Image (cartoon, grey):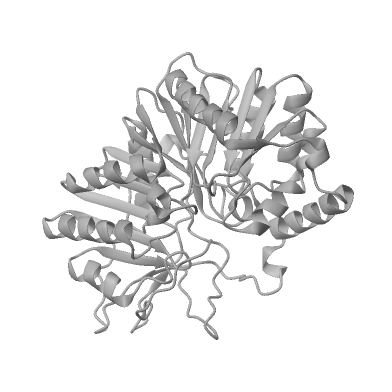
Amino acid sequence: MSVPSMEKSTVEHTSEPPVREPAAVDVEYGWQGNNRVVLLENGEAYFPRVFEAMREAKTEILLETFIVFEDKVGNELQEVLIEAAKRGVRVTASFDGFGCGELTTGYLTALSEAGVHIQMFDPAPKHLGIRTNWFRRLHRKIVVVDGTVAFIGGINFSGDHLADFGPEAKQDYSVEVQGPAVADIHHFALLQSGRPARAKYWWQRRRQRRSELAFSDHDGQVRLVYRDNGDHQTDIEEVYRQVLRSAQRRVVIANAYFFPGYRLLREIRNAARRGVEVRLILQGQPDMMVAKLAARMTYDYLLKSGVQIHEYCERPLHGKVALVDEDWSTVGSSNLDPLSLSMNLEANVLIRDRAFNRELFERLEDLSNNHCKAMSADKSPRGRVWHMTVGFLVFHFLRHFPAWAGWLPAHKPRLKRFTHPTGSKLHEPR
């Protein structure tokens, strides 16, 4: 994703504080019932609600995000976090070192001087004016306020998620969660921020591969799933494969960067072959052309099996959402491409709720019917066999051997605390 250039100098680390590995905890969160889940489409719905929750915070704000720009959205985020910290709220903000690599020292210093605990994920200096920390990103977008309300999805804190940004404004989704599932999201965010968190139900800490096939008759159920580079490398992908195998009537997947491995493609194809209506909504006007080219390598394979493919062409699609039948949905940060499925730190929520599923379906139905171009087999790219072969080789190389891929970093990414230009450090996470 592109990051606008800033006139001011970028972040400097004037001393070398201790570094920490991101938490790798063998926790698998189960389904939690009796939750209220609200779909938030685009920045117009997301930013007012998340800023309102932050302004009402009494004890704690936990924030993880991939991108913050110093535009009207990023400036409002800074203002809200400073206000919260000054009134005694403990604020911990984790920024990705690549996605937030253009934040100026002044922006971060203002936050830290107000008492905001800032940490950068895998920061790296530029070499010859080029950033080198491209891979293994903190790609999650999570906000938890007072342990009672959580936001999770694909929306960054940047003005390009608002329609007034222009033709390049992104189409995207997030959710607001209130209820018992917030405790799991809060627990997870605490661990990832480096702060201690009491073991969540110690008797559930053993690995429990809970099947997605046993659908409940009760609505309002939410489960957190995540991808890390430890014991949960394939959790999100496995959830997709399980629900595709169980689908009976319909599947709708809207995903910005679509280039999954063969096993997931095969489940999509098999669902369509057994009569399930499978619809993919993909980028027709991508912010990165390589995303469109990669996705189109899969078109012929899927179209000839009956999968419907719609390209959203009005503006860049940035969403990462899906639904199966009338009761299962997911919203989160994970794309269906090698970076999200094999390298990045990601988080999605799974939702069993008929009303939410219906609302998401209606939004995506309108998107595909009125704002997309339907693809057909005669529009898929030529040289299909060659493109598919090269595509799968590239994917599996990145998936299984990332440390061998030329200059891709083989080290484990780290969390580094931001320090004041004077060299004084933030407080250690507690």
For residue 219, which quarter of the picture?
A: top left
- Give x and y (percent) for residue 193: 36, 57
In terms of depth relative to the viewer, which is nearer, 179 or 8? 8
Q: Which residue lies furthest to the left in this view?
A: 87
Give the residue at x 76% y 44%. 298
Tell me if I can see residue 26 in this picture. Answer: no
Q: Is residue 420 left or right of residue 371?
A: left
- Give x and y (percent) for residue 119: 35, 66
For residue 214, which quarter of the picture?
A: top right
- Give x and y (percent) for residue 111: 24, 67
Figure check: 217 above or below 341:
above
Q: Is residue 225 left or right of residue 70?
A: right
Q: Is residue 383 left or right of residue 376?
A: right
Give the residue at x 38% y 51%. 164
Q: In this view, does 389 lie to the left or right of 341?
A: right
Give the residue at x 35% y 26%. 35
Callout count: 0
Figure check: 280 above or below 4:
above
For residue 199, which quarter of the picture?
A: top left
